[in-house]
Image (spheres, rainbow, N blue to C red):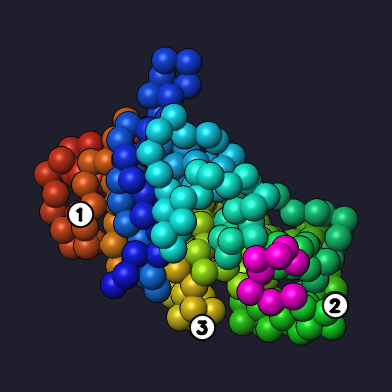
């Protein structure tokens, strides 16, 4: 499959500490790619470089052939790229619908796929919330909703601008066993039905191995391995550095 995202020799140093060291990998269009590794491996740092929250020391992040490192953070949001964060960041005093509509603002830039009217944005929100099983909660305030539901609201918000690339930072964190299983089914459906490519940082190995087409492993800021899930599970270096400790 053709690469939608290509990370090339990405390096980031903070005051002499190397957070990312010459990291390269590809994310194929239409795939679900897992980005795994021990705590402190550089996974979220890599996300922050892709979305321009951090300025890489060197290297390239190519999205559809264009270098994202030449863009500002707000320009990234208008390049069909969306993300979620480790900690759910919603507006508690707003309804589910209002929170999701916040995600529509990213579609209003000059490079957006569509410039939708308010009515069209509401229709899009209804579609996304319905697909994620949240239609009955559309008028409910976010405050007081179960944690797993709040994470689905955040996912819905990220899907509003019709991203071609969706970055998910630990989507299974804080979920129970049943919720994780449901999340896996949901993410496979999202990739298929919304025609979006997913790059996912995650520690829940059953989820990662179950839905990923490709997995990239980081350790101490370096790429340790990448390949199909079955290859990663059998890789001695990965087992020693990460999988064997889980």
Horizontally, is 86 left or right of 125 in the view?
left
Q: Badge 2 is on which residue?
A: 118
Magenta residues? Answer: 108-115
Q: Which mark is residue 232?
A: 1
Horizontally, is 112 left or right of 244 in the view?
right
| Lower sequence index among marks 2 and 1 | 2
Q: Quadrant of the N terminus?
A: bottom left
C-alpha separation, residue under disc 2 versus residue under disc 1: 46 Å
Horizontally, is 156 left or right of 24 in the view?
right
* SS for dot 2: helix
Q: Residue 16, position in %: x, y?
A: 42, 15
| Disc 2: CA contacts within 10 A as few (<14), some (14-19) or many (>=20) | few
Q: Badge 3 is on which residue?
A: 193
C-alpha separation, residue under disc 3 versus residue under disc 2: 23 Å
Kindly identify the residue that appears in the image at 43 percent across and 48 percent down: 61
Between 56 and 123, the one lying in front of the other is 56
């Amino acid at each position: 499959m053709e690469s939608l995202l290509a990370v090339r020799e990405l390096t980031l140093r903070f005051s002499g500490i190397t957070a990312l060291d010459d990291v390269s990998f590809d994310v194929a269009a239409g795939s679900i790619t897992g980005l795994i590794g021990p705590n402190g491996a550089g996974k979220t740092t890599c996300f922050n470089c892709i979305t321009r929250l951090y300025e890489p020391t060197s290297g390239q992040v190519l999205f559809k052939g264009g270098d994202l490192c030449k863009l500002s953070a707000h320009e990234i949001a208008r390049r069909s790229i969306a993300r979620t964060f480790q900690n759910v960041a919603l507006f508690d005093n707003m309804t589910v619908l209002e929170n999701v509509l916040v995600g529509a603002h990213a579609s209003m830039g000059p490079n957006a796929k569509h410039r939708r009217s308010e009515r069209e944005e509401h229709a899009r929100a209804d579609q996304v919330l319905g697909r994620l099983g949240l239609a009955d909660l559309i008028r409910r305030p976010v405050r007081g909703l179960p944690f797993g539901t709040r994470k689905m609201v955040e996912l819905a918000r990220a899907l509003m601008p019709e991203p071609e690339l969706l970055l998910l930072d630990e989507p299974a964190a804080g979920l129970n066993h049943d919720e994780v299983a449901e999340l896996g089914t949901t993410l496979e459906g999202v990739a298929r039905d919304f025609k979006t490519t997913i790059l996912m940082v995650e520690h829940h190995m059953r989820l990662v191995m179950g839905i990923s087409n490709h997995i990239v492993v980081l350790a101490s800021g370096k790429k340790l391995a990448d390949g199909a899930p079955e290859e990663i599970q059998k890789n001695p270096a990965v087992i020693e550095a990460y999988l064997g400790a889980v």
